[in-house]
Amino acid sequence: MIRPDPDFPASYAQARERFLAAARARGARIVSYANPAGPGLDGEALAADVAVLGPADAREVVLIQSGTHGVEGYCGSGVQHALLRAGGELDEALATGARVVLLHAINPWGFSWRRRVTEDNVDLNRNVRPFPVPDGPDVDYEDVHGLLLPEQWPPGEANEAAIAAFIARRGAAHFQFAFTHGQWSRADGVFYSGRAPTWSQQTLREVLRTQVRGAASLYWVDLHTGLGPTGHGELIYAGRDIAADIARTRACWGPSVTSIYDGSSTSAKIGGMVGNAFYDECPGTALAAIALEYGTVPMDGVRDALRFDHWVAAHAPQDAAARAQAREAMLGAFFVDTDDWKAAILRQGREALARASAAIRAA
């Protein structure tokens, strides 16, 4: 369990309650999208909530998004709540004349149940892709599926030796790509891209249409956890491989912005990212977009939590004790309940918004 904290929630239900209360206290316009997959872990209703501040006709929009990967919303919601509750940075953004849109828990099912995926086992950040998916198996993923999700759990030394042998033979970079790129072969596998748009993808598109379309510029911060050194927020470019968009993003957030396209990011090159929806829904709007990716625990710990979570969902969905154990493992892998970590997360979240404001003022 997460220790009591003024910003970081102990549950999705608490996160939503706090977010809505703080947004109302700020005088935000609120739009809620009910997720029909509910109820949540505590019997609560599930929804993606949008809080909007600033002029409806603003030329610049700042969008701060949490919960793309469900359980990562524990961190993202905390950043959003801190900005609403005691955020001078939010006041500075509004003073530029921008519209600020806070999209809370775009994947509320995963947030509530402490899973990274949506209610249909889909990784939302692999789901914004062309459909239908290709015919035939995803060959890269098929090479590793049996290694990642063996028939028995815990996997044992033979499985770990087989993974080590695969990495020695094909390389660590290929293993990460095969594992994480967004496979379409196995509906019960990891990093599944899905075979159709998810509810969360469709809701995101609606938010972009209603809150961003028609603006001159969008500054988009999607809050994530799980990659990189503990407490460090990597700024990963989050649009398509378009030179002007990458340059605009680096002009806003600095030369430390990394990219999956040039190999500078800790993330492998993936497909179906949520940023793809922008190009369909907001023609004519200039984009600067980052995934603010906070490191939590060493990568082996993140990988093992993901594997166990998916193994339980596929092989032991009725085992309440195993499901509870998987939820705790996922929370521990994607949220670090220490004062130092949380302070670092809030500082970098505030800096990300401040830099967007500075870019708007300089434009």
Image (tube, rainbow, N blue to C red):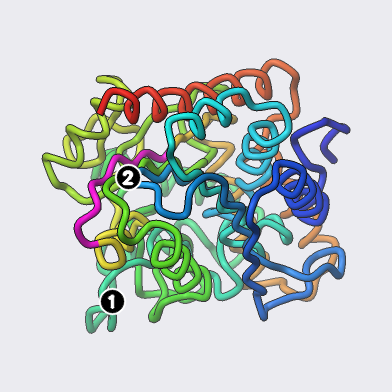
Looking at the image, is 220 positioned above or below residue 297? below
Q: Earlier in the sequence, mark 2 or mark 1?
A: 1
Quarter residue 144 falls in: bottom left
- Residue 251 in percent (x, y) is at 24, 25
The residue lying furthest to the left in this view is 243
Tell me what residue is drawn at x 29 percent, y 69 percent. 129
Label 1 SS? loop
Q: Along the horizontal axis of the image, is 14 left or right of 248? A: right
Q: Main secondary structure of the magenta part?
A: strand
Q: Which residues are magenta?
A: 283-291
- Residue 100 in percent (x, y) is at 50, 44
**Residue 289 lies in the magenta stretch:** yes
Viewer-nearest of labels 2 and 1?
Answer: 2
Mark 2 → mark 1, Cα distance in angstroms: 27 Å
Kind of residue sitting beneath label 1: Pro
Label 2 SS? loop
Kind of residue sitting beneath label 2: Ala
Residue hosting label 2: 238
Q: Along the horizontal axis of the image, is 96 left or right of 134? A: right
